[in-house]
Image (spheres, helix red, strand yellow):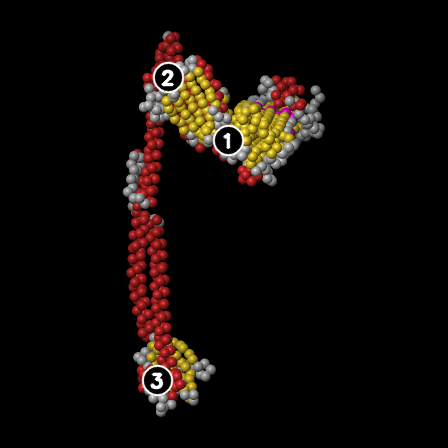
Amino acid sequence: MKPRSDSLKWKIAVSYAALLVLVLAATSGIIVWRFGSIIYAQARARADATMNEVLAVANPAGAPLGLQDVAVNNSPLQVLLNSDNLAYWSSPETSIEIDTPSGYPMAKSANLGGARIPAAPVDASHPALVRNADVRGVPAIVEDRFVRVGGTTDAIVQVSQSLATVAHSIDEARKTVLLVLAAAIVAVILLSIALASQAINPINELSRAMREIGFERLDRRLSWPRGDEIGELAQSFDDLLARLEASFSRERQFISDASHELKTPLTSINANAQMLLRWAESDERVRRESLETIAHESAAVGEMVNGMLTLAKADRGDEIPKEPVSLIEEAREVVKYAAPRAREKGLELHFEQASESAIVLADPHLIRQMIGNLVDNAIKFTDAGEVDVRVGSRERTGWLEVSDTGPGIGERDMPRIFERFYRADRSRSRSVPGTGLGLAIVRSIARVHGGSVDVERAGGGGSLFRVTMPLLAMLVALLAFGSGGVARADDIPTTASPIVNVVLSSGTLTIRTWRDSVVRIVTEGSVSWNRFDPRATAPRVPSSIESWAISVPTARGTATLPAERFLLPSLPGAHDAVVAQGYGNTTLTIPAGSALVITRVVMGTLTVEGYRGALVAHVRRGAMNLLGVSGTVYAQVVTGRIVAVQSDFDRLRARTAIGGLFFEACSARQIDATAIRGTILYDDGTFDEGPAYFSTSDGDVAIGIAGGRATVSARSGTQSLALELGSGADIRRSGDGETIEFGGGGPFVTALARGTVAIYDGRLESHAQLLSRIALPRVLPSALLRVERLRPRPRARPAFRPRPR
Ligand code: ADP
């Protein structure tokens, strides 16, 4: 490989070498400087010592014994100027000169020859000086001292200490250090390159080896012999390869199996089509048999493709929209639908619910398909006896068992029956229709929901399939707090503005308010509850809620509610919370000032009466009634209708996939109502501020204005607009619809429908013609009939008058 200037190796080597060179150079500099200052200090000390000896003579009281002629005959000045003494004090590097105060030389050591020590400005007021000067052309330290010799004569004593040796030593030291430094730098650079190579080369080798393994050689492994970090990297790469190889081979196998399985029915369809071409006209029997075969085989192909699509969907994992699903209710439904088939074969089909609830976070259609496949197989492969479906939960796991009294599964087949296209016991399987994908789908669905499936021999000789799945974590976490209770009729004291969260897996749930600071739960089934104080709720109070995308298959294609987010009003202050979950018909009475109610009914009817505040209400399958409710509301029923009577919404988001939205005598500041398949009726209502938006992609919209002002823009996909208006309404036609102004115009209201859009004044029942054009449920929701029994509504909107009829 070409060396690259920006490679990691060079970067490491250069920075490593630069750092070491810097450290070495700094260290050498410091050593040389320190060495110089030490020997300079020594020279200075020698000059000091000589000066002290000389001065001791000038002041004989302190003179050391043995110095020549000091004591007896001579004066201190004579001793000082004595040439022998000067010779004694001097040395090749030390010279001495004694001057008169005016700078005239009185004596000097012989080694000065004809030269002098340069004069210095010392006198009685500045008696001492140390300086650097050139003496005989050589740099030296010079000490000058002004003294009164023997107490009578003034003189200047000068001692010079040559620095020639010092300079030489420092020079030598510097040379040596530079030499060592140069050698060290070379060594350091070489070492840096070697070390960097040692660190990086294995990575280069590894990447070369990785490059050599292409898609065609997925079976190769690096099998790196080292146990260090690079070895670990190589091992991870090997593991990745192993997984890729397994996955590729699975895909290859799947494609080859799928083509093989599809080929047989397609060949048969083709052959029969050829027969039809040749014989259809002349031979009625051939015609019928060929058509029957084609119908049968194409159905088989369709089933197989569906299976593959489901597998692909289950394999997508995280992308699957999930919602709380009751395993018990889904299993109950499956059993209900399978019962006629079991009866036809003379089998007994039993359903047993082993615990109160088993709610998992899942895609309900996949869950139903999973249970359906197991029950279908059990019925398909069992000729006599019974099929038992049991479902329940244990600790944090939901489980489902399907057992039968059929032929069972051989030991040899057990490990393989969950593979795609695997069908045990070919001879038997040939006589029983199937694709070999059913159990693979079951396993994929269980896995994608964090669960598993296994099979064993049932007690009665047949087979027993068991699926386990983790229960919905939130509920598990909440229930694990203990301290709560299981209600039949419980009163739970709270503050005046608690947060209430109820999940009911099945049954009717009615929520009412009262003045007490108590949540009362009365149930015919079983509801367990917990109370949390504000410290526990504070971090959990949501600022928005999210709805998952939900798709519901219908006779006219899939109806999909897209994922969306709804902002909740902020809830200042401290709130405690009551969290309840269970099943069975239940009534909850909550404090009138409750801050937030979040409720979900998996299957059943939810009714909220007279509540004012923030409400989030989901119903999976069933119905929702909002009677005299006011505030900010998120209402969703996936399959089933929403009915709102005499409710005043600050902000309302209401939506259903299949079912209608029926509003009677309501008012709304902001409203966004969507029914995908179903009619929207906003009867006898008013609008404040706006905007209001009603839309259905497969149904009618009817809006009856009771008074007040509104600007309604109406558009129908089938150009079917019906207007019956009072005298106060103006109509403007535009290209793609109609705009009607009530009371001179006001809040903007948009009505969009594929079917008829009807705009009228007041109540629909007084517009007989319109009533016949709008697709309404044959039996109007019972809640609508109860309107009169609710509190009378003040009507203070006289601006628009309906035409007298
Ligand atoms: P299919 O039912 O379409 O053949 P599956 O994947 O559902 O495919 O099942 C694979 C095989 O496992 C079946 O062909 C059958 O041999 C065996 N099997 C599945 N369920 C049962 C059962 N309840 N009893 C006996 N054998 C079964």
Number of labels in the image equals: 3
Would the CB of label 1 be found within 8 Å of ligand 1?
no
Give the CA distance from mark 1 to mark 3: 112 Å
Question: Do the CB atoms of the residues marked 2 and 1 lie less than 8 Å apart?
Answer: no
| 133 lies above or below 697 | below
What kind of residue is marked 3? Leu
Direction from residue 196 to residue 310 in the image, left or right: right
The residue that label 2 is drawn on is: 432
Instruction: Count residues near mark 1 (Cα–Cα under 10 Å), then give few for <14, some for 14-19, many for 20+.
Output: some
State the residue at coordinates (71%, 21%).
Answer: 804
Residue 174 coordinates in the image, percent (x, y): 32, 67
Per the rendered image, the range of residues in magenta is 660-669
Instruction: Count residues near mark 2 (Cα–Cα under 10 Å), then give few for <14, some for 14-19, many for 20+.
Output: few
On residue 548, the disc is 1
Q: Quadrant of residue 294?
A: top left
The residue that label 3 is drawn on is: 65
Give the CA distance from mark 2 to mark 3: 134 Å
